[in-house]
């Protein structure tokens, strides 16, 4: 680290290649200072004045005057050749004069309408080829006619080339003067150009007096259009990008240089950045709020070259603006107003969006890898298929509701969360809603799961219970809801426990159903059942034949969720739609899942199985597994052999607590009991829930643990045996 900068006058100082991390250059005069290849991470340049020192300003003024004088001189002299051709009496010269005049007018029209581009180049090549052909095929004789034609062709070439050269010189002179914002100099430049035309005509005309008039007209047309081109080039007209690039490059030679510097997280707030060289600089999250004259800097190979991006980062106002498909990596949009902006398929990775207003913004398919969204307002945002990673920062998000899809003609329901359109997220609800997504991203990274294999699409119904939950009432209500709305294809896939504070129950539903109606129906039924007296509730349970297995399973899981603020996650190929980022290994983009991650809440870590010792549980599991038939294939393990291997792996693992082992063995026993009657289709849901529980139990363990590797191999085989994979 260099010593702290004390002085604010740093004109023409050489800091090339130095480490200036975190240095304070605020309010400093850095005109002409060279920061090329320097490390300027988190450096503060707020209110700094960059650009040209006085000596360079004077030199560029003189250059502009010289260019304008030469512009007029060359254009007037070239016009004199055309005037001589049109005014001369030599045979053939008039024809060449007409050709010259028509060609010049064509050039000027193309430059005005099309710019300095391919059309002009093609026309110039055609005319040059025509004139060269005339010169090439004329025989070498002493015939005066042929000599006259040769002279006419040469004069035509000189006249056209000189006129265009004068135009370009005038354009550069005006462009340089505009960059330096010196109005009085522009008038002097025009005067010098007019003087040059007069001088050129006097030196160039060789025939009649009328040639002076033609010379003046040609010269005046060339420098007038040149002045227009130079003005438009600095105003941002893309037709004249070549002139702008040349002018900015010339001016920036003497200005402040940040060439190839590392300006990550640097602060340029309210700085003046005229005539600054930012070529190839690292500008990740650099702050440009309120900077002046950034458009007159040299910004090749940076995101600053896009006028829309410059406008956005300078004003931090992107309301109602379309930024679809743009590369916005590393932009600093902290505190930006991006309400109702569209970022469909845009790349916002590494960007700073802290405290930004993204309400009603379209973030569909946007990439937000390593993006800072802390304290951002996402109320009403559309996040279908957005790409986030475990290092996407999502702390203290403000969000009353969110849309998981963009409305379309075929699917007008934007999938609002919360599902009840009359409700909004309470404080902390969005964090709980998004938490399983982040948890699952981490799970994929630690267990080397490839989410690209998961590809079906669905919507979810999210049911938040505050201040506790009645497990029996909830289990009956969700089961009856599934029975009353079979078209919804409702299936519980996620349960997140927050103790008595909050429980979130999440279910997969068919895409076309009205989730708001399901939401209201569920809580209506839940409230009615919860309010029943004990005797009436027992009568209701007895009335349900054999107390439906689904209700019993859900009731147990909900009861467990009350005791522990912990959730486990698991994914299936029949649920969810995930995409792995090819550019960002380990990052996962979750799409069309409405934030859903399948999983089941685990029992509390301190909860024990009443009256059952660890040894007794193990013995019961062993007895139940031994009742299963042996595998019919000697070379292939059957369900009995698979469960024995799982039992051994669970009992010998040193990473699980005794409580977790007991619960895991209990689930193993349930699977073994189901294995005794695998033909019973009703057992599939029981086995499915037990497999979820087992995978959830190992979710927090490192991928190198033997139990994790064993379960990774055996659990899919068990699921395949019961046809629940």
Image (cartoon, rainbow, N blue to C red):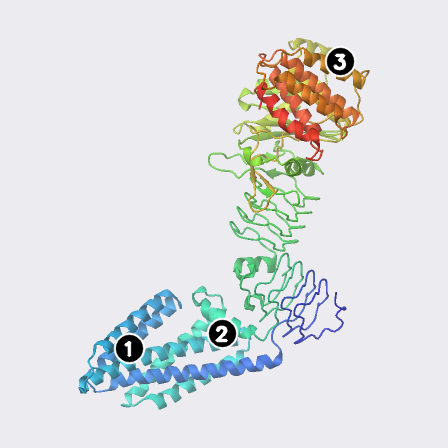
CA separation in Å, label 1 and label 2: 28 Å
Indicate which label's residue lies in the foreground, 2 or 3: 2
Q: Is residue 662 left or right of residue 172?
A: right
* Residue 415: percent from left, percent from top: 57, 34
Q: Is residue 89 left or right of residue 338?
A: left
- Within 10 Å of disc 1 (Cα), the crowding (few <14, some 14-19, many 20+) is many
In this view, 200 is above or below 515:
below
Quadrant hosting residue 299: bottom right
Q: Earlier in the sequence, mark 2 or mark 3?
A: 2
SS label for mark 2:
helix
Quadrant hosting residue 589: top right
- In the picture of the structure, the residue carrying the numbered disc 2 is 175
Residue 311, visible in the rendered structure: yes
Quarter of the N terminus within the rendering:
bottom right
Q: Is residue 479 left or right of residue 308?
A: right
Indicate which label's residue lies in the foreground, 3 or 1: 1
Q: Nearer the viewer, residue 468 or 650?
A: 650
**Residue depicted at x 28% and y 72%:** 129
- Within 10 Å of disc 3 (Cα), the crowding (few <14, some 14-19, many 20+) is few
**Residue depicted at x 74% and y 67%:** 2
In this view, 578 is above or below 203:
above
- In the picture of the structure, the residue carrying the numbered disc 3 is 534
Quarter of the C terminus within the rendering:
top right
In this view, 488 is above or below 703:
above
User: Count the marks: how many?
Assistant: 3
CA separation in Å, label 3 and label 1: 106 Å
Q: Nearer the viewer, residue 442 or 67?
A: 442
Q: Nearer the viewer, residue 44 or 370?
A: 370
* Residue 508: percent from left, percent from top: 59, 27
Q: Which mark is residue 100?
A: 1
């Amino acid at each position: 680290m260099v010593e702290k900068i004390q002085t604010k006058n740093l004109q023409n100082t050489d800091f090339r290649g130095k480490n200036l991390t975190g240095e304070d250059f605020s309010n400093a005069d850095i005109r002409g200072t060279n920061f090329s290849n320097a490390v300027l991470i988190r450096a503060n340049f707020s209110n700094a004045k960059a650009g040209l020192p006085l000596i360079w300003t004077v030199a560029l003024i003189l250059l502009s005057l010289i260019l304008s004088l030469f512009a007029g001189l060359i254009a007037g002299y070239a016009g004199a050749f055309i005037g001589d051709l049109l005014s001369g009496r030599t045979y053939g010269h008039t024809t060449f004069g007409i050709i010259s005049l028509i060609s010049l007018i064509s050039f000027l029209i193309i430059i005005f309408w099309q710019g300095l581009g391919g059309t002009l180049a093609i026309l110039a090549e055609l005319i040059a080829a025509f004139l060269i052909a005339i010169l090439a095929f004329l025989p070498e004789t002493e015939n005066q006619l042929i000599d006259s034609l040769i002279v006419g062709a040469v004069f035509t070439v000189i006249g056209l080339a000189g006129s265009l050269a004068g135009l370009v010189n005038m354009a550069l002179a005006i462009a340089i003067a505009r960059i330096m914002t010196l109005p009085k100099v522009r008038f002097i430049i025009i005067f010098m150009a007019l003087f040059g035309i007069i001088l050129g005509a006097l030196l160039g005309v060789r025939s009649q007096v009328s040639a002076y008039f033609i010379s003046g007209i040609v010269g005046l047309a060339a420098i007038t259009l040149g002045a227009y081109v130079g003005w438009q080039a600095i105003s941002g007209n893309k037709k004249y990008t070549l002139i702008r690039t040349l002018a900015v490059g010339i001016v920036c030679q003497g200005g402040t240089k940040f060439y190839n510097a590392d300006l990550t997280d640097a602060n340029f707030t309210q700085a003046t950045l005229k005539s600054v060289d930012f070529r190839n600089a690292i500008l990740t999250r650099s702050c440009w709020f309120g900077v002046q004259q950034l458009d007159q800097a040299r910004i090749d190979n940076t995101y600053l070259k896009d006028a829309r991006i410059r406008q956005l980062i300078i004003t931090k106002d992107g309301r109602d603006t379309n930024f679809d498909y743009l590369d916005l990596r590393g932009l600093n949009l902290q505190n930006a107003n991006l309400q109702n902006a569209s970022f469909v398929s845009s790349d916002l990775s590494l960007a700073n969006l802290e405290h930004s207003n993204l309400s009603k913004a379209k973030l569909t398919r946007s990439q937000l890898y390593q993006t800072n969204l802390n304290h951002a307002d996402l109320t009403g945002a559309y996040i279908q298929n957005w790409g986030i990673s475990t290092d996407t920062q999502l702390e203290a998000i403000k969000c009353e509701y969110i849309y998981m899809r963009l409305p379309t003609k075929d699917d007008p329901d934007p999938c609002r969360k919360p599902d009840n359109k009359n409700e909004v997220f309470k404080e902390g609800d969005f964090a709980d809603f998004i938490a399983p997504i982040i948890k699952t991203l981490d799970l994929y990274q630690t267990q080397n799961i490839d989410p690209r294999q998961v590809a079906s699409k669905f919507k979810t119904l999210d049911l938040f219970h505050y201040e506790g939950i009645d497990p029996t009432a909830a289990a009956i209500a969700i089961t009856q809801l599934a029975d009353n709305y079979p078209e919804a294809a409702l299936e519980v896939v996620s349960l997140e426990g927050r103790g008595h504070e909050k429980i979130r129950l999440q279910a997969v539903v068919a895409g076309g159903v009205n989730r708001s109606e399901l939401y209201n129906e569920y809580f209506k039924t839940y409230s009615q059942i919860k309010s029943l007296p004990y005797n009436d509730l027992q009568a209701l349970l007895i009335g349900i034949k054999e107390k439906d297995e689904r209700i019993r399973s859900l009731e147990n899981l909900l009861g467990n969720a009350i005791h522990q603020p912990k959730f486990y996650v698991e994914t299936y190929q029949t649920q969810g739609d995930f995409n792995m980022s090819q550019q960002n290994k380990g990052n996962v983009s979750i799409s069309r899942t409405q934030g859903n991650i399948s999983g089941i809440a685990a029992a509390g870590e301190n909860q024990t199985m009443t009256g059952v010792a660890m040894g007794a549980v193990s013995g019961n599991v062993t007895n139940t597994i031994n009742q299963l038939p042996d595998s019919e294939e000697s070379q292939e393990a059957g369900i009995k052999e698979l469960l024995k291997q799982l039992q051994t792996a669970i009992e010998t693992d040193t990473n699980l607590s005794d409580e977790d082992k007991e619960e895991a063995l209990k689930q193993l026993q349930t699977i073994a009991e189901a294995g005794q009657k695998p033909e019973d289709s009703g057992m599939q849901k029981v086995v499915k829930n037990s497999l979820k529980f087992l995978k959830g139990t190992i979710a927090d363990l490192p991928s190198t643990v033997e139990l994790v590797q064993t379960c990774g191999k055996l659990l899919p085989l068990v699921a395949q045996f019961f046809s629940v994979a």
